[in-house]
Amino acid sequence: SKPSSNDKLEKECFYCHKMGHIKAECRKRMHDEKKKSSAVALMATQEDNQQKGYQLWTLDSGATKHITPDKSQVIQSRSLEEDVYITFGNHAKEPAQGIGDVAIKTRLFNGQYSHLILKDVLYVPGAMTNLFSVKQATSRGASINFKGCYCTVSMPQTGTVIHAFQHEGLYCFKSTCH
């Protein structure tokens, strides 16, 4: 039997608690969700990132921002102007709790160390690992070249700044802890 119009009027929205609609149809919920900024990280890994003496960073071509779950890496931390939620590849959403810069010290293939500052890194305690956003890096002038089992990140002013290697099918680099 077809639901009567009375059935619809008797329904209470679990989001705004008004009568006449359900949460899935709630205009207030849709409006509120549009207001929240959202970023995406398509890669997530289960590996323990607190390896002795260094941090592992994974290059992520689907991430819109650099991300770290480790607040101790963030320098010049500042609060976000609006709520930001990161959607990971498993569809989990995690809130960013701040933004700042991260100092990276990584060894290049020639044995020399590269020092750089990643700007505007989101602090997301629920992230599984550090994510280096290919999109964010290239939008700031970086060139990224994948070749075989390694990857090179270069800046026009300074040349090669990161050599990443394949690790469990993903391109990663180590940053020495300061």
Image (cartoon, rainbow, N blue to C red):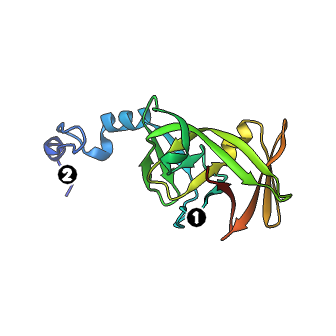
Q: Is residue 157 left or right of residue 171?
A: right
Mark sitting on residue 3: 2
Mark sitting on residue 105: none
- Find numbered disc 2 in the image and state the secondary structure of the residue it sits on: loop
Which amino acid lies under the numbered mark 2 shown in the image of this protein? Answer: Pro
Q: Position of residue 153 (x, y in %)?
A: 78, 49
Q: Is residue 152 above or below residue 140?
A: below
Q: Is residue 49 above or below residue 80?
A: below
Label 1 sits on residue: 52
Residue shown at the point (18%, 39%) measured from the top left: 17
Residue shown at the point (67%, 52%) measured from the top left: 61
- Find numbered disc 1 in the image and state the secondary structure of the residue it sits on: loop
Which amino acid lies under the numbered mark 1 shown in the image of this protein? Answer: Lys
Residue shown at the point (55%, 64%) measured from the top left: 45
Q: Nearer the viewer, mark 2 or mark 1?
A: 1
Q: Is residue 165 left or right of residue 72?
A: right
